[in-house]
Image: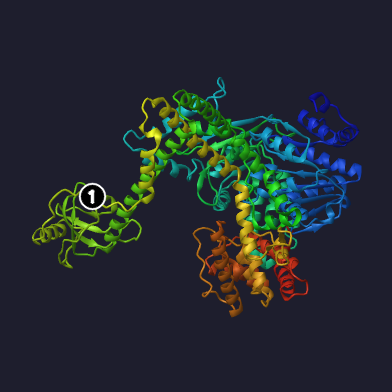
Amino acid sequence: MTIDELSVSGPELTAFSTRIGFTLDPFQQQACAALEAEHGVLVCAPTGAGKTIVGEFAVHLALAHGTKCFYTTPIKALSNQKFHDLAEVHGSENVGLLTGDNAINSSAPVVVMTTEVLRNMLYADSSALAGLSHVVMDEVHFLADRFRGAVWEEVILGLDPSVRVVSLSATVSNAEEFGDWITAVRGDTTVIVDEHRPVPLHQHMLVGNRTFGLFDRRHPTQVNPELTRFIKNRLLSNDAVGNYRDRVARERRRGGGTGVSRPRLIKMLDENGLLPAITFIFSRKGCDGALAQCLRSDLNLLEPDQVAAVDTIVDRHLVAMSPGDADILGVEEWRAGLRRGFAAHHAGLLPMFRQAVEELFVEGLVKVVFATETLALGINMPARSVVLERLVKYNGEAHVDLTPGEYTQLTGRAGRRGIDVEGHAVVVWTPEVVPDRVAGLAGARTFPLRSSFTPEYNMAMNLIDRLGVQGSRDLLRRSFAQFQTDRSVVGQARQLDRARMSLRKVDAELDHSAQRKGLEPEAFLEYMSLREDIKRQERAAKFMRRMESTEAVSDDLLALKPGNVIGLNTGRHRGLAVVLERAEMDIDPKPLVLCEDGWVGRVGVRDFVNPPEVIGHVRIPKSANRRSARGRQELVSILRNSGIDRPRGRNTKRKQESPSNARLIELRNKLRKHPVHRLSGIDDLHRLAERRSRLLRDINSLEQAVDTRTAALETQFDAITGVLTELSYLEIDDDGELVVTPTGTVLRRIYSESDLLVAECIRAGIWDHLSPPDLAAVVSSMVYESRRDSYTGGIDSMPGNKALRDALTETVHVWESTNDIQTRHGVVQTREPDTGFCVAIGAWASGRSLREALLAASERGQMLSPGDFVRWNRQVIDLLEQIRGSVDPDASLAIAARKAIKGVRRGVVASELD
C-alpha cells in the first residue's frame, strides 16, 4: 500500500479513533489502515511512542467482525496488565487471560496470554484457535532472547496463513530485513518504522553535585566540553602528587560507589522538577541497599493525604496475606518506604509487592523506584526521568557493558506522553565512566535483531508429529535464523561465483595453450594432478614423522623421575639437568628440572629435538630447598660433582628411516614415466595449472563455508532426531518415514528446558510412587538453578525420607545415561539436576509455613528471597501440570502431581498470580 492509501481511514478505523478520543500519529494511522486493509503489520517505534494503539485496533477489528484476537506478551506481568486494560475498555465478558499460572474466561473473543501459551496451543492444535483472525505479538524483539526467542519464531511460522499478525517492536536497525522475512513466511506485511519520540529525551551526566548536558549545545553530536573539563579537574583536584588509583578510591568513598548519595540525588531531581524517576541498579542487593539508604535519611516525598492513599492501596494488595507471613516478609519496612514515596522493584520481591509499587507509581504516589532492568520490559511505568548508576550489568555469566539497544530500552522510560513535555536520562558519573562512551550509547538509538532460533527436543517432536520430517525441515528453512544466515553468506556466494567464473576462463586459456603446443589438455591436467598428489603424500609423511617424534618425546618426559639426570642441548639453559618433580599432566607433560646454571623450571616437548635420555641418577637430599638460593646452589653442586658427563656433539635429529610408502613410490615412478615429464617450453602451462589449483582450493573452501552455515539448523535437527530415534521416541514406519511413537507423545507435552530428561524419568517410572511433596521436590530439580556462589549439599546429605533420596539418585543416573547418548550424537547436554530447592519446596508442599520453608532453603546454602521462592514454586507447578497432562489421568503419577500442585499453590504462591 502507498503512503497516501495508508493515510485514509476506513470505517472501523474512524470508529476506533472516535472512541479513543484523540488524533492518531501518522505511523499509528498508517499501521491501523494497513491492518484494516487485511495486511499484517510490523511496527517499530521507540518506547512510549504509542505502538500498542495498533495492537488495540486489532482487538477492535476482531470484536467488530465477530472473530478472535490473541494478544501475546513476553512476561506474565505484562499479560496481567494488558488483561486489566482491555477488560476495562471492552468489558470483562469479552476479555480472557491465559498465563500458565492463571486462566480467566479463556473462551472470550479476546484473550491475553504469554507467547509460550500460544505456542503450546499451536502444537496441541487447540480448538481455541478456531475463528482466530488476529494475533498481536507485543515486544516481538524478544525473538532475539537467547533462552526464549525461538518461541516467537515458532508462533509466526505455525499460525494459519489467514491470521493477521501484528508485530510490535522497539526500534531495530534491521527492521526492513525482519519485515522482509515476515512477508516471506506470512504473506503481505506492511512495515512501519518510526524513530520519532513524541516526548524529546535529554541526556545528562551527574558528576558529584553538578548536572551537565551530555552533548554540546552548538554541536549536538559532540560531547559537552565543559563536562569533560570538569571531570578532568575533579580527578586532579587537591592531589598533585597522588596516583590515579588513589583518586579513583577517593571518588568511590565520596559517593558510596556512585559519586552521589541516593537521598541527595533524589533531592536534586526533586528540586529540578525531574520526579517521578526510575533509578536502574543492576542488582537486587543494590536496589535494596538504595532503599535502605533512603529510609535511614530524612527524605520524605509525600504529603499526609498522599500517605493515606498509599495505605489504602497497600492494604488492598495485602488483604490475603497472613500476619505470620507479613512478619517474615518485612511488610512494615516495605510500607515505610512507600509512605515516604520511594520503593524497590525487582524479581526478588513478591508479585503482590511489585504490583502495589507499579500501581502506586502510576498513581503518582511513589516518586522514585530503584529497579533492576526487568522494569524496562514493557511494564507501563513511564517516568519523567531515568537514572543509570552503572553502565555494566551481570548477564547470568559475566559482567558486561550495556549495549546501545539496552541503553535505549532503559532510558526510553523517561518522558510520559500527555504529561511531560520532555524526558530526562541521567547517567551517574564514576571514574570508570567515559563521557564519549555514554555519548556512543545515547547516539546509537537502534540495535540489530538477531534470531536465536534453534531446534530442541520438544520442538522436533511436535513439528514431526504435525508436519513430518520433510515438513519440519521446510519450516526450519523458513525460520528467521535461516533467512539471516542465507543473507549473511551472500558475500561468500558472490566470491564463489567469481571464483567459478575465473576457473572457467583459466580452463579455456589452458585448453588453448595446450593445443597450440600439441598437447591434450586432459593429459597435461593428469600430469599436474600427479604432482599435487605427490605433494600431499609428502606433507602427510612429514606430518606423521613429526607426530611420532613428538609422541616419543612426550612419553619419555612422562617417564622421568626425581633424581634422573638428562642433557639439555637447546635453549638458553644447556648442559646437565636433574629432575626435581615428575610431570603433572599426561597432555603436554612438563617435569620440573634444575640446570647446571642454577635455573629451575619446567621443560616440555618444545625443549627437545629428540626424546630425552636418562644419562645418570643423583640422590636429592630431603633438606634441599629449590626455592632458596642456598638450596639451589647445593643441588647444582651435587649435579656437577656427580661424575656424569653431558653427551658430546650437536643435538641433531636422529636419522629416522622413512616407513615404506608404496603409494608415494608408485606416484613418483608414474610421474617420471608420464610423457609430459620430459617436455620443455611449457612454463606458461605450469603457471596456468598452478593458478587453476589455487582456484579449486578457494572454491572448495568457500563451498564448505557456505554449506556449513546454511545447513547448521538442519544438522542440529538431524542430531536431535538421532537421539530421539535411539531412545525410541521416533521410529521408522513401513513407508520409511520417521514418526512419533506412543512414548514420544509424552515428550510432545513437556515444554521444560530439561524436556528429554523429564520424559525419560517418566518412562523409567522412577517418580511413580512418590508422595506429592516428594514429587514436587524431585520435579524442582528439573527447573531450579542455584544462584552463583551458593552451595548445595549432595543428595546423600539431604534431610528427609529415603524415597526422595533414591528418586533423586535414579534421576541423576538417567541424566548421566541420557547425556552419554547426546554426546555421541553431538547434541548439547542437558544441564544437571539441581537439588538446591528440593528441601524448601518439599516443606512447603507438606503444609509448612513460609518461614520454615525459607529456613530449609537457607540450610541448604540457598538464600532465597520471597519473590524467588514464589517464582520457583510457580515454575514447579507449571512442570507438574505438564507431567499430569502427559500421562494417564488415573495413573499414580498424575494423581500425585495433582495433589502436589494443590499443596504448592497456597498462601503467597497462590495469591494474585502474576
SS at mark 1? loop
Q: Position of residue 430 (x, y in %)?
A: 47, 39
Quadrant occupied by the N terminus? top right
Is residue 441 something that shows in the picture?
yes
Q: Position of residue 105 (x, y in %)?
A: 85, 56
- What amino acid is at disc 1? Lys
Farthest-out residue, top:
218
How dense is the environment of label 1, judged by Cα within 10 Å: few (below 14), some, or many (20 and up)? few
Q: Which residue sits at x=88%, y=46%?
A: 67
Q: Position of residue 742 (x, y in %)?
A: 73, 66
Instruction: Please determine whether, in this image, residue 87 is positioned above or below residue 564.
Output: above
**Between residues 119 and 20, which one lies in front from this camera angle?**
119
**Between residues 393 and 271, which one lies in front from this camera angle?**
393
Quarter location, residue 566 = bottom left
Mark 1 highlights which residue? Answer: 653
Image position of 406 (left or right of 49): left
Q: Which residue sits at x=62%, y=59%?
A: 722
